[in-house]
Amino acid sequence: MKLIKTFGLIFVLWMMCSLTACASKPDADVLMREATANANAIQNCTASISNTLEFTANEKQNTYKTGNEIVYWAKPFALKSTQTSLLGGTAGNSTSYTVTDTDGLWFYSDSGSGWQKTSAGDIDTTPLRQVDILRLLDSIKGQKYARETTLDAKKVHKLELTFQSEVLRGTVENIVTATGMAQGSATIVQTILDGIGDLYGYCYIDESSGSIVRIELDATEAVNKMFHNIDGSGVTINISKCEITGDISSTGKAPAVQLPPEAAAAQNVEAQG
């Protein structure tokens, strides 16, 4: 009888420990710290980022959209960047390359009149600086675990992020410039950013690799509320969309970055000057 009771007690304790383990959540700080280290160790990947701002100023519609798709290689450093934009009704697109050769690091771009080659200088070539969406990590104040979920058929950890409003400086500058509400003020952008306060978004970390695969921020409500609270501007602003989203994929399996023949044949602009 005592033996049965002992085994019964052990079973109960085992069940309690199992339930406790299932109920506990992964440590968000540890996940983010390890994911950031993994991100900076990326040898090659593809990545994209999109930034969308839509608003009306005194009922006039304004749309600002920018996007960038890159192929990144760490050693030797190479970066292909394909950018798209829709700014104030004007659409644009461009492709550029930054590659390493025996003479150093070079930037190749086509301004519309042919390819040009210029020195890229002493730039930071690490993934945290060259992969656009990873630069958002600089503006993160904290994180907490949301839940386990799936993204593109992969199991991922979903973390809720707290961003500093500084992440939206370019967005606020676009609104202020488009509406003319600055009226000569040199501090209005910072004042608006201070008023927006903290922002909240999400980071998705692949469970199997510990790698960041997506970061997203929807600041529509927070920015709209801030501009509604500005008194005396003379401009009525309604924000309908303010979003930043970025993905990282093909880590360790990215295609090679190859200069097109016409770019490879470009002359060094500095040498000509």
Image (tube, helix red, strand yellow):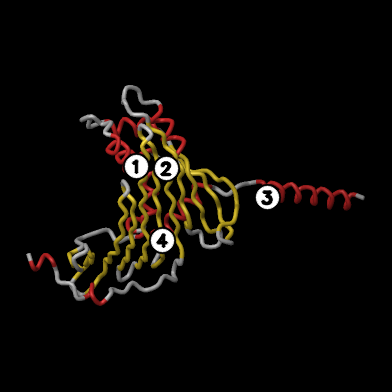
Is residue 156 rendered to the left or right of residue 75? right
Identify the residue shown where x is 34% and y is 42%. 171
Kindly identify the amino acid type of the residue bearing the numbered disc 3: Cys
| Lower sequence index among marks 3 and 1 | 3
Report which residue position mark 3 lands on.
22
| Lower sequence index among marks 1 and 2 | 1
Which quadrant of the rendered structure holds the C terminus? Answer: bottom left
Label 4 – label 3 distance at C-alpha = 34 Å
Identify the residue shown where x is 29% and y is 61%. 94
| Lower sequence index among marks 4 and 3 | 3
The residue carrying pointer 2 sits among few (fewer than 14), some (14 to 19) or many (20 or more) residues within 10 Å by Cα, namely many
Label 3 – label 2 distance at C-alpha = 37 Å
Report which residue position mark 1 lands on.
171
Kindly identify the amino acid type of the residue bearing the numbered disc 2: Cys
Report which residue position mark 4 lands on.
47
| Lower sequence index among marks 1 and 4 | 4
Tell whether label 2 touches label 1 (CB within 8 Å). Answer: yes
Kindly identify the amino acid type of the residue bearing the numbered disc 4: Ala
Label 1 – label 2 distance at C-alpha = 8 Å
Label 4 – label 2 distance at C-alpha = 20 Å
Report which residue position mark 2 lands on.
242
Identify the residue shown where x is 33% and y is 72%. 257
Mark whose residue sits in front, 3 or 1 = 1
